[in-house]
Image (cartoon, coloured by chain):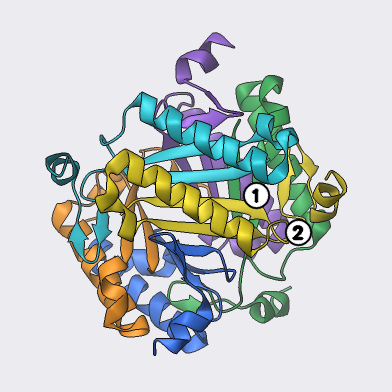
Chain colours: A cyan, B purple, C green, D blue, E yellow, F orange
Amino acid sequence: MPFANFKVPAGTLGPEQKQQIIDRATDLYAELYGEVARPNTLVIVDEVVDGGWGIGGTVLTAAMLKGAD
Amino acid sequence: MPFANFKVPAGTLGPEQKQQIIDRATDLYAELYGEVARPNTLVIVDEVVDGGWGIGGTVLTAAMLKGAD
Amino acid sequence: MPFANFKVPAGTLGPEQKQQIIDRATDLYAELYGEVARPNTLVIVDEVVDGGWGIGGTVLTAAMLKGAD
Amino acid sequence: MPFANFKVPAGTLGPEQKQQIIDRATDLYAELYGEVARPNTLVIVDEVVDGGWGIGGTVLTAAMLKGAD
Amino acid sequence: MPFANFKVPAGTLGPEQKQQIIDRATDLYAELYGEVARPNTLVIVDEVVDGGWGIGGTVLTAAMLKGAD
Amino acid sequence: MPFANFKVPAGTLGPEQKQQIIDRATDLYAELYGEVARPNTLVIVDEVVDGGWGIGGTVLTAAMLKGAD
C-alpha cells in the first residue's frame, strides 16, 4: 500500500544501491504500518536526466557528483 | 485542466499502449468534469529506468514482466 | 505493481468519483499488464488546495468549476 | 502542454503568492516553447501538511518559516 | 541534493513517525552519496486525502488502516 | 528548502534552457521565502519519454513540437 518515490541524478546509482533504497524504504514502511503493508509497498527510484538537477541555482551533474567521491 | 501521471517500468509499454492510457484517462476526466475539461487534460506516462521499481522489496525488471506474459 | 497518480482541485470530486478513478485505472492496467498486475495496482488521487491550480495563467478554483456545471 | 509542480509547506503562501508562481512559470514556458504553449500550461502548487517537510534531517514547520521572516 | 517523496494516507502517521521517515531517508542518502549530501537532502511526506488511495481497486481508508492495528 | 518539479517532453530543451528554468524557479522562491531559502532550493527538470505526453487526448511528440517552432 505505501508509496515512496526517490529521485536521483541519472547514472549516479547502480542496481545494488537502488535495491538498497527499495529494501530500506520497504522495511521502514513495514515498521510503521506493520508487516501487512510489506507485500504491497511500492518504491520507485526515478532517474533525472543530466542537466535537470538544480540545487541553490547550481546545476548538479553526474560528473560533478562522481568527482566529489 | 485535470492531470494524471502514470508511471510504468521502462520498455514495457509501446506507443499504442501509451495512447490507450492517454485516451482512457482523458475520457474519464471528461466524464467527471464535463467535455469542457477535455482539451486541457494533461496525461503523462513516465518510464522508470530498469532496476528502479520495487514492490514488496523485490525489484521488478522489464525482463521479469515480459517473462510473465 | 503499476502506479497512477491523479491530481484534482480539492473539493471537486466525491468518494464515488474517486472510486470510479481507482476502478478505471486499475482495470486499464490489468488490460495492459494482465490480471496478475491487478492486486498490486496503486492508484492515488491527490487533492490540490484551492488557489494552487493554474491553467494558462488562470487560477482555477473549486467555485469556478462548480459554477461551470 | 508544459507542466510544473511546486511543493511548499502548508500555510506558508497565500493566494497572491500562488498566483505569482503560476504567472511566472507560465511566462517561462511561453518563453521556452512559444506563446502557443501558454493556454495549456498547467502549474500546480501542492501544499505539504505540517511535519512532512525535512531538509538535512530537520523537520521544517510553517511556524519556523514564519519565525524566520 | 537528493530528494525523496513519501505518500501516505492522511491521518495515519503522526509527527514522530514523519520525523522517523525523514531521518531514515536522510541517513540512507548520506550513506549512498556521502555526508556532503546530508544538509541538502529534501524529504517530503505527502498526505493523501481519505478516499484517494486505491490498492488493487479497493479504496483504503484511514479507518481501515487503524482497524488493522 | 522549496521544491519545484518541471516535466517536459524529452529532447525538447537543451542544457541552457534547463539552467534557465532552474535559475528562474530558484529566484522566484528566494523572492517568496527570502534569500535564506536560496541555497536549499531544489529544482528538478524531468524528461518524459516520447509518446508519453498527451494533451486533450493527442499525443504530443518532440517532432511535433520542433515542427511548431
- The answer to whether residue B38 of the structure is visible from this angle is no
Q: Position of residue B63 (x, y in %)?
A: 46, 14
Q: Please give the chain letter of the residue carrying mark 2.
A: E
Image quadrant in which you'd find residue A14? top left
* Nearer-the-camera pick, C29 or A46: A46
Which numbered circle lies on residue E50?
2
Look at the numbered disc 1 and give the secondary structure of its residue.
Answer: strand
The CA distance from mark 1 to mark 2 is: 10 Å
Q: Please give the chain letter of the residue carrying mark 1.
A: C
> Which quarter of the rendering shows the C terminus of chain C?
bottom right
* Nearer-the-camera pick, B52 or E28: E28
Write the residue at 61% across / 73% down.
C49
Q: Position of residue F66 (x, y in %)?
A: 23, 49
Residue F46, placed above or below residue C66: above
| Dot 2 amino acid type | Asp
Q: Nearer the viewer, mark 1 or mark 2?
A: 2
Mark 1, residue position: C44
Residue C65, placed above or below residue C23: below
Q: Residue furthest top?
A: B67
- Binning the other alpha carbons within 10 Å of mark 2 as few (below 14), some (14 to 19) or many (20 upward) gives some
> Which quarter of the rendering shows the N terminus of chain C?
top right
- The answer to whether residue B31 of the structure is visible from this angle is yes
Query: Is residue D59 found left or right of A47 in the rendered image?
Result: right
| Dot 1 amino acid type | Ile
Q: Position of residue E5 (x, y in %)?
A: 49, 52
Write the residue at 43% across / 59% down.
D57
